[in-house]
Amino acid sequence: MIIDSAPIVAIATAPGRGGIGVVRISGKNIASLMQSVCRVAAGSTLKPRYATYLDFTRADGSIIDQGLAIYFKAPHSYTGEDVLELQGHGGPVVLQMLLARCLEAGEPIGLRLAQPGEFTQRAFQNDKLDLAQAEAVADLIEASTEAAARSATQSLAGAFSKTIHALVEQVTQLRMLVEATLDFPEEEIDFLEKSDARGQLERIRDALNHVFNQARQGALLREGLNVVLAGQPNVGKSSLLNALAGTDVAIVTAIAGTTRDKVTETIQLEGIPINIVDTAGIRDAMDAGDEVERIGIERTWGALENADVILHMLDASRGPTREDEQIVLRFPPNVPVIRLWNKIDLSGHRPAVDRMPDATHVYLSATDGRGLELLRAELLRIAGWQQTGESPYLARERHLVALRGARDHLDVASELAAQSDRALDLFAEELRLAQERLASITGAFTPDDLLGVIFSRFCIGK
């Protein structure tokens, strides 16, 4: 990303037609631009934080649109800079005309188009938000469930950041105590006992584990779970997808090979988005009906490579076949597999869950719905979801990696604290590394190249 202090402008509302459209400008010395674009009374200016109804005009004074102008004077704005928001009608043409007029009027002050996420990046750089809160802005916009939106709001309000700051403070205090003791070697022998360093460290580790569990729950709310249905033709994959979705999203017939391509549907389990992919029935290429089905089967194998969980569906009324076992051999390693024994309405089995070393076996009927709750519960178990009653933070994989790294350093510190030779210099170093990993979550030790990656994934205008 380009990092400079030039004023920036962008359309802040989503593409397409709407009742209202917003053009947002942020930067220094934008007073002349306001006078050029907004028709205000001679000698007057826009009052900060007040909405003013007026005309948006061209250079010759003709009207582009009419709407509200709101001026936020630095530092009391989203970005910490002077911000002007022009709220007009939401037609794409009129918004592009207004954007072009702003660029024209702002040319003398170097106004340029904003890059994705640049408004929020400036908010981060001007200490209006820390990095975790900035990421929560994008997460709130992209939230696909109510639970994810609530958790993103928690993070945006600073709940996650406050927890991380508290952990950093505890690690810092213990580190300062250790490093102070290093200046007095004769005191090292009794240091751990007198200062209860081990007790402090264990309390920090317990707190970190709690935060990690909450963050992992939040990551599930954000990322969801990719679940792929696989199996031979006509075992009931499409029927199960329809049953879980509560609607007919996939065609179901008695003809083998009905599903030719991937069909994806997202459902919610305890607020977690579960992306279920129904795939073409797997059978030998020689038996495939035509070229389209053969391509569908190849795409099935591609989908399985990206699965978080594989639902291997089998026909309980006929039992396992050699073809079923051949399918299992091609499953990607290290991906959890649930064997779904469908059609228990025909086989006489009862709904049940049987956890075996190779896989979990679930007996159900996609036709009458028996056993579906068992499957839902098993998906939540594999995902690691725990119903705590607390609203988790909407964390990202980056946060989990940092928390794991900090936990690893604290584990090493705990091992050092237990050694008889009291390796306090190494103990202090592990605390320092844990502190840095935690601080990277809120942006204190985040490299510029990572910031570029994070903010480039935002939408333009935010």
Image (cartoon, helix red, strand yellow):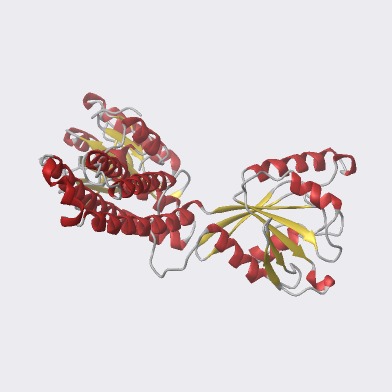
Using the image as rendered, state which of residue 8 and residue 446 is in the foreground: 446
The image quadrant that residue 319 belongs to is bottom right
The image quadrant that residue 114 belongs to is top left
Residue located at (65% from left, 42% from top): 305
- Where is residue 132? Give x, y as percent: 32, 47
Using the image as rendered, state which of residue 427 and residue 40 is in the foreground: 427
- Where is residue 83? Give x, y as percent: 23, 42
Relative height, residue 62 to residue 167 (above, below): above
Q: Is residue 150 visible?
A: yes
Image quadrant occupied by the C terminus: top left
- Where is residue 226? Give x, y as percent: 59, 51
Relative height, residue 245 to residue 208 (above, below): below
Relative height, residue 315 to residue 52 (above, below): below
Residue located at (20% from left, 52% from top): 192
Using the image as rendered, state which of residue 83 and residue 375 is in the foreground: 375
Residue located at (24% from left, 57% from top): 200
Image quadrant occupied by the N terminus: top left
Relative height, residue 138 to residue 151 (above, below): above
Residue located at (77% from left, 51% from top): 259
- Where is residue 436? Give x, y as percent: 28, 41
